[in-house]
Image (cartoon, coloured by chain):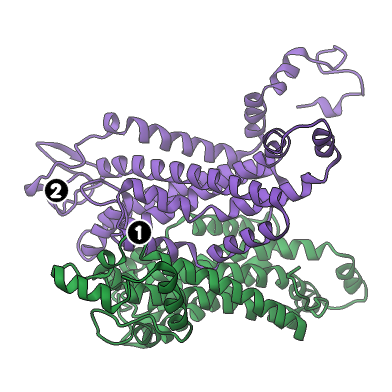
Amino acid sequence: MQTFLISRLSQMALTIFIVSLIVFFLVRLKGDPVAVMAPPTFSESQVEALRKAWGFDKPLFEQYIVFLRKALTGDFGLSIQARIPAMELVLNRLFNTYLLAATSALVGLVIAIPLGVISALNRNSWLDIVTTTAATLGTAMPNFWLGLMLILIFSVNLRLLPAFGALEPAAIIMPALTLGTGIAARLSRLTRSAMLEVLGQDYVRTAHAKGLSNRIVIVRHALRNSLIPVVTALGLQLGWLLGGSVVVESVFAWPGVGRLMIESIGVRDITVVQAALFWFALSFIAINLLLDIVYTLIDPRIQLRGERS
Amino acid sequence: MKVGNQPFGTAPNGTNGILPEKRSFQKSALGQLLFSLRRNRVGLFGTVIVFFVLFIAVFGPLVAPHDPLQHNLRGRFKSPGYTDAKGTFLLGTDQLGRDILSRVVAGTRISVVVGVLSVVIAGVTGVSYGLLSGFAGGVVDNLMMRIADAFLAIPFIVLVVAVSGVIGASLVTLIFILGLTSWVTYARVTRAEVLAVREMDYVMAARALGQSDIKIMFKHILPNVTGSIIVLATMMVATTMLAEAALSFLGLGVQPPTVTWGLMLSDGRQYIGSAWWMSTFPGIAITITVLGVVFVGDWLRDLLDPRLRGQ
């Protein structure tokens, strides 16, 4: 366990270092970072003052060292609009984004696993065909459009749910459904094929032969083992989920980090964009590390080694 | 089709089982594709959709019933089927009285162009990167793959939103941004194949014969990856089209007056309380297009690279 953690953490450190380079060069892609970061209302002299204040007149390497040292302490500079540290703005929104992501992942799993199992148990039945078709449709549908359609149905026509904001608990339902069904579409196909593979294994036949009830065989023997690839995929899907949250938060005006990022781009508050980008990468890396550890809990066969198998 | 039931050595037409016309049919690559399509209904369905979308993308202006940019202030927010002196507006009109159907048709071209071109850029970048990394081996390979991994540590859409938000997007920059942020998977697939093939006897033989690394790369290694790359590229066309729509929807993609499905949905959102058709039809267009591409991708994967199944 220890060597596994050390090796994974050093890999993480390297990845974070490279992510920091990407974030650093983001504002320099167009050449002059001040031109990108200064609000359009600034005068020539104000721009020059900004250049000095932010150290953009120093050599590139020196700039990066300063940037990295600050970034490691969470300091990405002040938000030009809000005049408070950019990271503080991100942290204020963090809870909402994590709440939405966790709820969506839960919605996704709750839909995907039963559907995948039922599909696998009734292979080629109409139920299977309907589920598989719906799953394919779910992956092809843009999530923001699904969000719009939900608003159209539940807010405009049925007047059941609030269309935007996060003022009441019910407001999370539609964004979580939007992202959750996307996850479900991707995971249910996988659960189905993993389940089919496990059902063909010898130990499942043995369990049946021992006279165990169908339910116990399916839940304890088949489902548990077919969850392993599902957890792996969930890790990859979390990237999709975090990305999707940027768009879906904007559709529903959900006050999370993704929406903050879009708002900040709109007013050219680039320090906030950098802080948000860095935080998205950190979250994604951390979540994948956590999932690696979760593997061992659901599959004792997996030995934690330096490398992912 | 009944060949399997015949006794060995005889064919349905009484010849010795070698049907010349059938053999030549199966030999050509196109023939093989068509043959496999006949047995794969989903693939066939996808191919039909893709060809239809391509047709609309190329001949859009000829097919569209109206000018997609033509304002008509007296015909604003008309519901589907509205008819006046200017003709019928099958899918209704938007806030400026522009014909939704013609705009959906016009948006097809942007979606196809962005999807295809950015995938070409990503594919060329990723495959070259993977070839180099795999061939270099050792420390260089390790470092190059770590850099690639870091790109994967930032969710695709987040990265694209940040980059296009900061440098500002036009059609051309958008294509490059989408291409240069989605190359990593190609690099990984190619590199894995290079590592597997590099130690094979025939590569060693080629090397012993004095062939240069570049020649070995292109002649012996690249053909091995082609199948996987084609499948991956097809899937990525779908992903990129969705990303382009999302970016345009957020106002970070192609700017008006260019017509894109994402921009139409962004307009539609503003009037979602009064004009449902504005936000419904462009979304259907995206979904059908992406669905077609995904079906074709699934079929190609089964055909070319069964190892990728389940990913």
Q: Position of residue B84 (x, y in %)?
A: 11, 40
Q: Check the picture and name the quadrant holding the N terminus of chain B.
A: top right
Q: How many marks?
A: 2
The label shown at residue B230 is none
Q: Secondary structure at mark 2?
A: loop
Chain that bears disc 1: B
Indicate the quadrant where residue A197 lies. bottom right
Q: Which residue is mark 1?
A: B164
Outermost residue, left side: B74
Depth check, front residue: A30 or A66: A66
Question: A274 left or right of A222?
Answer: left
Type of amino acid under label 1: Ser
Q: What's the colour of chain A in the image? A: green
Q: CB of mark 1 within 8 Å of CB of mark 2?
A: no
Q: In this view of the protein, can residue B257 be seen by the observer?
A: yes
Type of amino acid under label 2: Gly
Question: A179 left or right of A128?
Answer: left
Q: Position of residue A54 (x, y in %)?
A: 31, 77
Dot 2 surroundings within 10 Å: few (below 14), some, or many (20 or more)? many
Q: Secondary structure at mark 1?
A: helix
Residue at point 75% right, 32% down? Answer: B211
Question: A3 left or right of B77?
Answer: right
Chain the render paints purple: B
C-alpha distance separating marks 1 and 2: 30 Å
Q: Position of residue A17 (x, y in %)?
A: 54, 73
